[in-house]
Image (cartoon, rainbow, N blue to C red):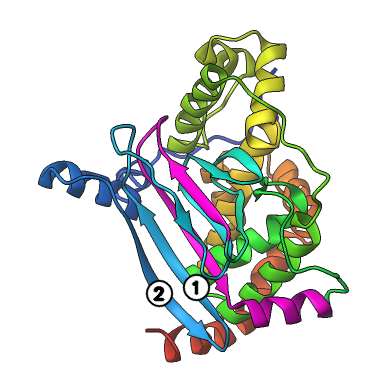
Amino acid sequence: MNLSCEKIAKVTRPQESLLQSTSKETGPLSVALKTRERDGRAGAAEGKTLISGDGWRVVDVLCTCGPADRPFEERYWSVAVSLVLSGSFAYRTSLGSVLMSPGSWLLGNVGGTYECSHEHGHGDRCLSFQFDPALFDHVARDAGLSAARFGSNRIPPMRKVAPLAARAISALDGNDSFEEVALEAAATALRIGSDSGHCEQAVAPRDRTRIVDVLHHLEHDASRVRRLEDLSKLAGLSRYHFLRVFKAVTGVTPHQWLIRTRLREAARRLARGEEAVTDIALDVGFDDLSNFIRSFHSEFGMSPGLYRTARPALRTNGAKDSRSTAL
């Protein structure tokens, strides 16, 4: 089984530039990890407030902890809805323990305790939307919900939150309104994450480690062709067992995780500039333009071209939003 899109004979992928091939190595997380190693420092989590408003704030959280760093329990002083941008880590609250990976949303109740650990790898980066309880209660009432609390630890990178993740990343690039995204994130997280009846499937620690290794492999270069057989061998599992464990750990199948990673990157690039749609499709890993267009429409509810034309108005509002109030 091939986890990439179908190929067509007339389409060939252009040679990857050095900048593209090293983009992972020069990103904020990689730079922070290299600085930590160079300076011989212990791992730590640091948050940079990007913007704040009445009862809400957006924080860029960069963590350089690894297996050798001892995790410790912390407490939420506000409600947190955080998008994982890069890296994987274990997240534990009174609701249980889950693995967070890129594209998933971490949920935290005010007053609740939590612990993040990196026994499977080094570092992560999250875009954290934080809310004062009064504002969050107001959002819950407006959404028709009786309680402003989460009943689960995370929202996996599933289709119903894909547009929200894309907008959050666009806002980080200065191409969307952080305030709009923050309020949408609060309402969406409440609608999906308030279900206390959802139970995460238990996974053996050894199997979780195997899936994290595969996630690191996929995250490093999501545009490459991936076969289910190769990924299951990398994990040291049969194909059936790999599929079952991967979904239990991440909340989605390998195919869904990979395609959504590619589509988020495509949406980011569409919002940023005037690159040809075909070039973007090829660069992120789609070898069939028609398949890319169909997948993009299914994920975001509109074609790539329409998505791009919707961005100018958002860029105008978002630029004012994210720059005039930034700390």
Tell me if 42 is positioned left or right of 13 in this view.
left
Q: Is residue 304 visible?
A: no
Tag shown at residue 308:
none
Q: Nearer the viewer, residue 141 or 123?
A: 141
Q: How far across and how far down the image is residue 208, in percent?
A: 55, 24
Q: Considering the image in quadrants, where does the C terminus appear?
A: bottom left
Q: Amino acid at mark 2?
A: Thr
Q: Nearer the viewer, residue 190 or 7?
A: 190
Secondary structure at numbered mark 1: strand
Earlier along the polypeptide chain: callout 1 or callout 2?
Answer: 2
Tag shown at residue 49:
2
Which residue is found at the position 74% from the left and 55% from the top? Answer: 193
Crowding at dot 1, Cα within 10 Å, few <14 / some 14-19 / many 20+, comes out as many
Which residue is found at the position 38% from the left and 46% from the top? Answer: 20
Q: Amino acid at mark 1?
A: Val
- Disc 1 to disc 2, how far (Cα)? 6 Å
Q: Nearer the viewer, residue 207 or 113?
A: 113
Q: How far across and how far down the image is residue 252, in percent?
A: 70, 36
Secondary structure at numbered mark 2: strand
Q: How far across and how far down the image is residue 256, in percent?
A: 70, 37
Q: Is residue 131 magenta?
A: yes
Magenta part of the protein: which range? 112-141
For the residues labelled 1 and 2, say whether their Cβ atoms are less than 8 Å apart: yes
Q: How far across and how far down the image is residue 245, in percent?
A: 66, 22
Q: Which residue is labeled 1 in the image?
A: 58
Q: Nearer the viewer, residue 97 or 217?
A: 97
Splitting the image into 4 quarters, where does residue 308 fall? bottom right
